[in-house]
Image: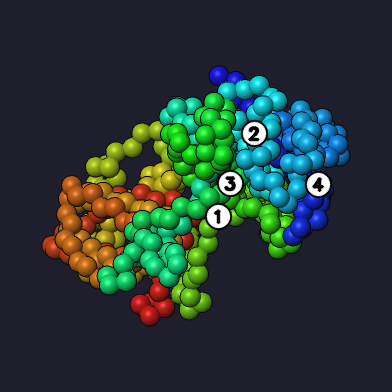
Amino acid sequence: MKTIAMIPARLGSKRVPKKNLRLINGRPLISYAIESAVKSDIFDEVYLNSESELFSKIADEYGALFYKRPEKFSTDLSNNDDFVTDFMKNVDGDILIQILPTSPLLSTEEIQDFVREMVNRNLDTQISTVAHKIASIYKDQPVNFKIIEPHISSQNMIPVETYATVLMGWKYKNFLKNIEELGLAYHGGNGKIGYHQIKGLSTIDIDNEEDFRMAEVAMKMQTFSEFSEPEYYKPKNDRIEVGVEDILERDGVLKSNYCEENLPLGNLSEIIERNDPNYSWCHRLVNTENNSATLVAQIPGEGNRLHYHPDWNEWWYIVQGQWKWNVEGEEFIVQKGDFVFIKKGLKHKILAIGDEIAMRLAVSRADVEHVYPYEDS
């Protein structure tokens, strides 16, 4: 089947004069839709459809064909059905995908997904939508909730979908049949209709001056090659420690061996045998850019201080003895053979208990932040 992309643009615009020709980030607004359509490599032909010859040069510059529509289909009295019908009657094809130029951040991936879904589901009409997971009202009546019901958090609500309109798809045959029989076809008329959700920056639609400014800011942000990793608020009174050596020393581990790490072969039994069971000690086995593994031994009554790791999941393997493990106020007893996983952000501490020295293999990374809450320090 022959799939055609058609980008409609008229010279006149009431809210933002000549908006399709207006420069955004140094290029005419309409050029972004053409570029995305061409780069998607999913269309047999890409057309810019306008009554003004001014657009023909832009079409040629960015790799599209130009279709000049009659003036009568570019007035305030004409509608989408009018110029689409005219286009279909003059440009041969089987599926028409209309791409509005007012969404300059529409990605090639969104276009590809939209077209493939329409073809795979054998739809006569497909409409792009935006999902809103929020309580919605129509004519003073609730749409996706009931007035007499407990509050439902937004993430659990049934989403309401609104037209995005940036992408519309019609099969020629069904569209023209609806025009002939119903006098309309935009919403699908008689035929198999599907809805395709688009997300993120692709949903930005320029209708007014404020939209232009928002789109330009978003576009400039996209030029950054790197974005910072997520960061979260930490109370100023909380203390942050990073160095493993200093942290273990503050936890009472005064005898430490960091000189035999990253050996191709090691033996835990031999390491344990050569250390005094009456004193706390540690032996780091692995220390690389990916992770670290430290065997930590502490006598009953010793352990670590309450802390959490904001950006790192940690795990331990209990090698010997018993530990009382406290996570967010809940206490557990772990012993030889147990495996302990601590999810990032959870406050935790351990305490060696029982009658013998307790040992754990702590797997983390040497540069992980340990945050000690002020009120618990």
Left or right position of 320 against 174 = left
Of marks 1 and 4, the one in the foreground: 4
Sequence-wise, the earlier of marks 2 and 1 is: 2
Disc 4 target residue: 11
Residue found 38% across the figure and 44% down from its top: 285
Q: Mark number for residue 85?
A: 2
Sequence-wise, the earlier of marks 3 and 4 is: 4
Mark 2 residue crowding within 10 angstroms, few (<14) / some (14–19) / many (20+): some
Is residue 235 in view?
A: yes
- The answer to which of 32 and 262 lies nearer the viewer is 32
Marks 3 and 1, Cα distance to the nearest angstrom? 33 Å
The amino acid type, in three-letter code, at marker 2 is Thr
Sequence-wise, the earlier of marks 1 and 4 is: 4
| Residue 334 higher or lower than 125, as above or below | below
Sequence-wise, the earlier of marks 3 and 2 is: 2
| Residue 63 higher or lower than 296, as above or below | above
Mark 4 residue crowding within 10 angstroms, few (<14) / some (14–19) / many (20+): some
Quadrant location, the N terminus: top right
Quadrant location, the C terminus: bottom left
Could you say where residue 292 lies in the image, as x and y percent from the top left?
41, 47
The amino acid type, in three-letter code, at marker 1 is Glu
Sequence-wise, the earlier of marks 4 and 2 is: 4
Marks 1 and 4, Cα distance to the nearest angstrom? 43 Å
Disc 3 target residue: 165
Sequence-wise, the earlier of marks 3 and 1 is: 3
The amino acid type, in three-letter code, at marker 3 is Thr
